[in-house]
Image (tube, rainbow, N blue to C red):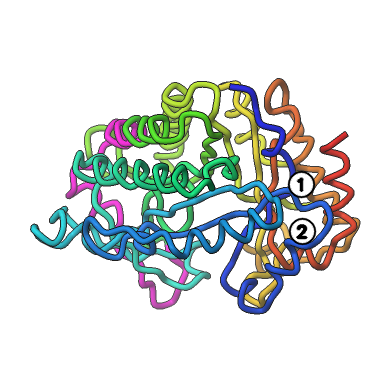
Amino acid sequence: MALPPAARGIYVWPYDWAVKKGDFDKALAIPGVDGVGVHLTWSEISPAFKKYDFTAMDRQLAVAHSRHLAVELAVAAGQGIPDWMFTPPPDGLGLQRLDFKITYHGGVEPCHKVSMPAPWDPRYQGAFAGMLALLSAHLRSTGYYRDVAVIKLTGINTLTEELALPNESPAESRNPNPCVTDCPRIWATAGYRPSLVIRAMRGIAASFQRSFPDKLVNLPIIVMGAFPPIGEDGRPIPRFKAIGLNNKLLDDLVSTATQALPGHLVLQDCFLIGDMPADQRTVNLAHANSLPIAWQTNIWFGKIGKGAASGGQGNTFLEKLQHPIPCTEESFLNLLHNGMYPQGGSGPSRNALFIEVFPSDVVDFPGAIKAAHDEWKR
């Protein structure tokens, strides 16, 4: 499958705070913006069992269409899984509900509730495939299908569209009052095996292939600590002993998705920063599977309604996290360049296909956006 020209460039990724304060609308009018993210959760488009309402999605698609922008579509699962999944029949599927409380960065972020079934459950797989089929049919019937350049591969998620499952234990949280559940124990009780996650990916990726055979499908990954530290024997193991296990699982999941979506899978990492190269693990994975590569910037200043930092002060990630350095026009363009021309990239990954940016950065650094756009189009 040839990559559509419209897929390349700068995509504005929506966030609620940016929409509410008006930055999102402003960003879409900045010269150099090539595309826009249209983001919904599964529960938003399916409020009740066997009922779907695409009204909110259509409003977003209409804005993109009116501005002649390519669309990157995402329907999030994980925290976005509808409640009817767990409701007993006839009002739902009655699947086993796995309830988690998770946080990020060792407890420095707020705690979130995530409820999901096991992603390898055939009934979950069938429901997800049915959602994708209805989504595709609706897009075709409205004419918006042609505006979609990229769709995100979701279905195995937590709080974002990135490929991940709840995996923390309370001992790993630095929060003085840890709220996290013992995720490995919950998964072990549910029969978790790495091979079952691979089976889940095979089924979900095949569903995207059936419903979107001519679209780029974007798989966003987290390169470390994205899965429960549990071996194939079903027993939890210490986190430091599971590094190799989880690395192999990520390798196998990307390979499985590549095979299921021949010629139209894109690999994405959702963190770019100005003071270090783009993630080499992601670049190597893309190269090993002959995949195009995409990125998202960072949202270090999200708590104050802003976007990316150019870097951080300190020697460790947590130190840097607590002392971010604001971007300038120059440093933001450097950040984009780190993704556009990833160190070690070659073949399809030599130059990035697209980069997702946050609205406030587009508004604050229009010169960098236009410069990056012009470089891509040359």
Q: Which SS class for mark 2?
A: strand
Query: Which amino acid type is shown beneath numbered disc 1?
Result: Met
Please report whichever mark, 1 or 2, sits nearer to the chain's N-terminal start: 1
Corner quadrant of residue 257: top left
Horizontal relation, residue 293 to residue 176: left or right:
right
Give the residue at x 76% y 33%: 343
- Residue 239 visible in image: no
In the rendered image, the vertical position of residue 373 relative to residue 348, given as above or below: below
Q: Residues within 10 Å of mark 2 (few under 14, many from 20)?
A: many
Q: Is residue 80 magenta?
A: no
Mark 2, residue position: 311
Q: Residue at x 50, y 44 (%)?
A: 152
Judging by the rendered image, the residue that carries numbered circle 1 is 276
Q: Position of residue 105 (x, y in %)?
A: 52, 61
- In the foreground, 224 or 21: 21
User: Residue at image x 56%, y 61%?
Assistant: 60
Q: Is residue 174 rendered magenta in the image?
A: yes
Q: Is residue 194 left or right of residue 9?
A: left
Q: Is residue 330 left or right of 248 when viewed as pictured?
A: right
In contact (CB < 8 Å): disc 1 and disc 2:
yes
